[in-house]
Amino acid sequence: MEQIYIYLFVMSAVTIAIRLVPLTLIRGQVRNQFLRSFLYYVPYVTLAVMTFPAILSATQTPVSGALAFAAGIALAWYGASLFKVSAACCVIVFAVELVLC
């Protein structure tokens, strides 16, 4: 039971450090182009890394998830709206799982 307080303290310290260190070290505007682009894309990469495995594992078969993912990328690439992409992906998953299962 005593170790849980140590774990909570370490978790709190790491969480606070992640948020406070950049604020204290970076006072002005970031002028480095590489660092600016890195900081710009970090949220997108994090979202993609968390979402991609869920796309494949949320369906009954990974094949239907992969086909819907490929169709979603293609539709988004050609400018379809978010609603059209998500609706098409749902229809593809439904159709593929209807055939496979």
Image: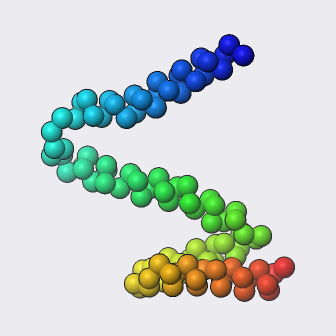
Q: Is residue 74 visible?
A: no
Locate residue 88, reporting x and y percent: 58, 85
Q: Is residue 70 above or below residue 12?
A: below
Q: Out of 42 and 21, give the one closest to the viewer.
A: 21
Residue at the spot x=55%, y=78% of the render?
A: 86
Q: Is residue 15 visible?
A: yes
> Please, which residue is most extreme toward the top here?
2
Q: Out of 4 and 79, give the one closest to the viewer.
A: 4
> Is 15 placed left or right of 60 in the picture?
left
Residue at the spot x=37%, y=35% of the render?
A: 19
Locate residue 34, reporting x and y percent: 24, 49
Locate residue 83, reporting x and y percent: 50, 81
Residue at the spot x=31%, y=54% of the render?
A: 40
In the rendered picture of this protein, how many numbered marks are placed on residues? Answer: 0
Residue at the spot x=62%, y=59% of the render?
A: 53
> Is 28 placed left or right of 54 in the picture?
left
> Please, which residue is most extreme toward the right here?
101
Q: Quadrant of the C terminus?
A: bottom right
Q: What colour scheme governs how the chains and residues are painted in the rendered image of this protein? A: rainbow
Q: Is residue 17 above or below residue 44?
A: above
Q: Is residue 18 above or below residue 43?
A: above
Locate residue 50, reporting x and y percent: 55, 55
